[in-house]
Image (spheres, grey):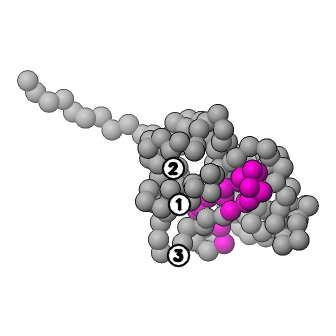
Amino acid sequence: MSKGKQIKTEVTLEQLLAKNNVVHIKDFSEIEKLIDFHNLDKDKTPTIVTKRKTILIFDNSTFNETYLIDVFNEFMETQPPYITKEDVDIMYIDDLFLRMQIFVPSVTKDSFDFENSVVIKELEMSAVKPGFIIINPERNQITSFPEPDFISINIENMNKIMSWLK
């Protein structure tokens, strides 16, 4: 019996997102349904608008440099009991300008050359690194977990990050 050739298939971002019903956010109005950036509390934290626990995944804008969706999907295979599709909204943001709007509200399309790959790479390595935001309205908490310098977020530290949903 001869072994056949293994065919390597390309996986699309849409397939990776569909694996755990992750919503691909492409417009700031979707973020405003979760967090009100105009109504800051006394320590300058945005107000939580959503009533549901939410995971925001911030990944690189270039698909061949994305990795957080892979780490997240691998983590979800462990079936953490405190993250169920019925109880937690999971959203993915890879658009650099949209990510900048969240972390630097004063940014405009004219602030940077968002079409320049060198500028994009520099911004993604400094101003808006990949990471997660956990919104837990039950605890009135918005917690950000940016990628630490020189260290990638991995499956080992995902339990700590996602524990903020408990």
Along the line of sight, the residue nearer the viewer: 136 or 131: 136
Along the line of sight, the residue nearer the viewer: 144 or 28: 144
Q: CA distance from mark 3 to mark 2?
A: 19 Å
- Amino acid carrying mark 2 in the image: Phe
Q: Which mark is residue 15?
A: none
Residue 156 is one of the magenta-drawn residues: no
Residue assigned mark 2: 72
Residue 85, horizontal then vertical, whole percent: 61, 36
Q: Earlier in the sequence, mark 3 or mark 1?
A: 3
State the residue at coordinates (61%, 74%): 126
Along the line of sight, the residue nearer the viewer: 158 or 109: 158
State the residue at coordinates (50%, 57%): 158
In this rendering, position of residue 162 left or right of residue 97: left
Residue 120, compared with residue 82, is above or below; it is below
- Residue 104: which quarter of the image? bottom right
Residue assigned mark 1: 160
Q: Which residues are magenta?
A: 127-143
Residue assigned mark 3: 149
- Residue 18: which quarter of the image? top right
Residue 114, horizontal then vertical, whole percent: 70, 63
- Amino acid carrying mark 3 in the image: Asp
In this rendering, position of residue 132 left or right of residue 50: left
In this rendering, position of residue 104 left or right of residue 61: right
